[in-house]
């Protein structure tokens, strides 16, 4: 397995998020990725490789030029503290710091480098992207996300074959869903907490099935907050069955570990022992796979969850 990582993510270091009008400590911190890469190196899970640079046109395929330019310009402002723009933002969970643009570009490069490895015959790649991406939409940042790493990688791969995206983060990947909502060549399947109860609140419902040509190629599995390991694995099998029917050439996994019962901001009733089982179930698809890091905020357990997950993933 290849592992793609760059420590440029450290340049993105917001101190707080605004929750209910109050500044609260930011859970999406550099320590998350630092802990993960350390554990993967310790376990010798694969060759760790720095990302290559890719053309900006890969980003323009998913995000508007106006938005990309706005992010470039505004994250260069050194306001002395975290800065919340008034435009191109969909909630109060995407602060800008001086290095946000640079870090976000490198996260995209990690995803694209991983995707490119699949084109070069690699069967399994893990891209340790930070900041995460699945809430970033065509023209907006939100939910700790700036560029949609998974959507950009999936779109890149879609010129070489059929792509399925499986999003297992606790939160619905609204950005990824909307990027492919009208397309039948990229399937989006997501398991996430019931959006009636949890962020992002306005998307992730069962009746969102896609539009036009894309109708039938968007499948949401909202979960009750009390979902247990067994219940989760059972619903995951239905999601995997949908992916199998689609017969993808490539699988993109938006891997969030905030479904863990001990997660400080997410948390279903999932225990640490479920992650190897989730990995084993997904790898049964026997498909060239890129795993892209999304959420997971229990900084103490995250390295173990990711490493256990990757260790149980049998390359397709
Ligand atoms: C990003 B990803 C709690 C409110 C947090 C934003 C959640 C963003 C999650 N203080 N709401 O999907 O893990
Ligand atoms: Zn999440």
Image (cartoon, rainbow, N blue to C red):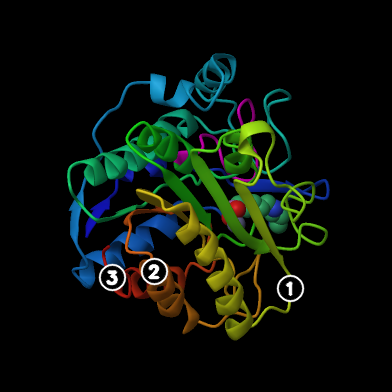
Sequence-first disc among 2 and 3: 2
Q: Quadrant of residue 32?
A: bottom left
In magenta stretch: residue 142: yes
Say which of marks 2 and 1 sits in front: 1
Sequence-first disc among 2 and 1: 1
Q: Quadrant of the C terminus?
A: bottom left
Quarter of the rendered structure image containing ligand 2: bottom right
Q: Nearer the viewer, residue 211 or 85?
A: 211
Q: Let me know if residue 2 appears in the view.
A: yes
Badge 3 crowding class, 10 Å Cα cut-off, few under 14, some 14 to 19, many 20 or more, is some
> 170 above or below 156?
below
Q: Position of residue 183 (x, y in %)?
A: 56, 34
Q: Position of residue 79 (x, y in %)?
A: 60, 26
SS at mark 3? Answer: loop
Magenta span: chief secondary structure: loop
Q: What residue is pinned by disc 3? A: 314
> 294 above or below 147?
below
Left or right: residue 34 compared with residue 140: left
Q: What residue is pinned by disc 1? A: 225
At a point 38% along the width and 20% down the height, the residue shown is 56
The magenta region covers 137-149
Q: Nearer the viewer, residue 87 or 17?
A: 87
Q: What residue is pinned by disc 2? A: 303
SS at mark 1? Answer: loop
Sequence-first disc among 3 and 1: 1
């Amino acid at each position: 397995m290849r592992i793609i990582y760059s420590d440029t993510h450290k340049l993105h270091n917001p101190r707080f998020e605004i929750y209910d009008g109050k500044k609260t400590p930011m859970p999406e911190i550099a320590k998350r990725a630092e802990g993960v890469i350390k554990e993967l190196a310790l376990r010798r899970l694969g060759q760790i490789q720095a990302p290559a640079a890719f053309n900006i046109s890969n980003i323009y395929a998913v995000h508007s030029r106006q938005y990309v330019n706005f992010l470039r310009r505004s994250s260069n402002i050194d306001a002395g503290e975290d800065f919340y723009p008034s435009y191109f933002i969909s909630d109060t969970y995407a602060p800008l710091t001086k290095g946000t643009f640079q870090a976000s570009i490198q996260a995209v490069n990690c995803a694209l480098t991983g995707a490119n490895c699949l084109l070069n015959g690699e069967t399994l790649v893990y891209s340790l992207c930070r900041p995460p991406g699945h809430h970033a939409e065509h023209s907006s940042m939100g939910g700790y996300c700036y560029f949609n790493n998974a959507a950009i990688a999936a779109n890149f791969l879609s010129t070489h074959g059929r792509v399925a995206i499986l999003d297992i983060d606790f939160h619905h990947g609204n950005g990824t869903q909307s990027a492919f909502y009208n397309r039948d060549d990229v399937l989006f399947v997501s398991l996430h907490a019931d959006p009636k109860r949890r962020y992002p609140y306005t998307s992730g419902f069962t009746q969102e099935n896609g539009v036009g040509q894309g109708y039938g190629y968007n499948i949401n599995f909202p979960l009750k907050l009390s979902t247990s390991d067994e219940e989760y694995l059972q619903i995951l099998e239905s999601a995997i069955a949908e992916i199998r029917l689609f017969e993808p050439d490539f699988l993109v996994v938006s891997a969030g570990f905030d479904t863990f019962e001990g997660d400080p901001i997410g948390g279903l009733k999932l225990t640490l022992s479920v992650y190897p089982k989730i990995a084993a179930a997904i790898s049964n698809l026997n498909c060239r796979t890129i795993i892209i890091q999304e959420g997971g905020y229990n900084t103490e357990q995250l390295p173990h969850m990711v490493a256990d997950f990757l260790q149980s993933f049998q390359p397709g």
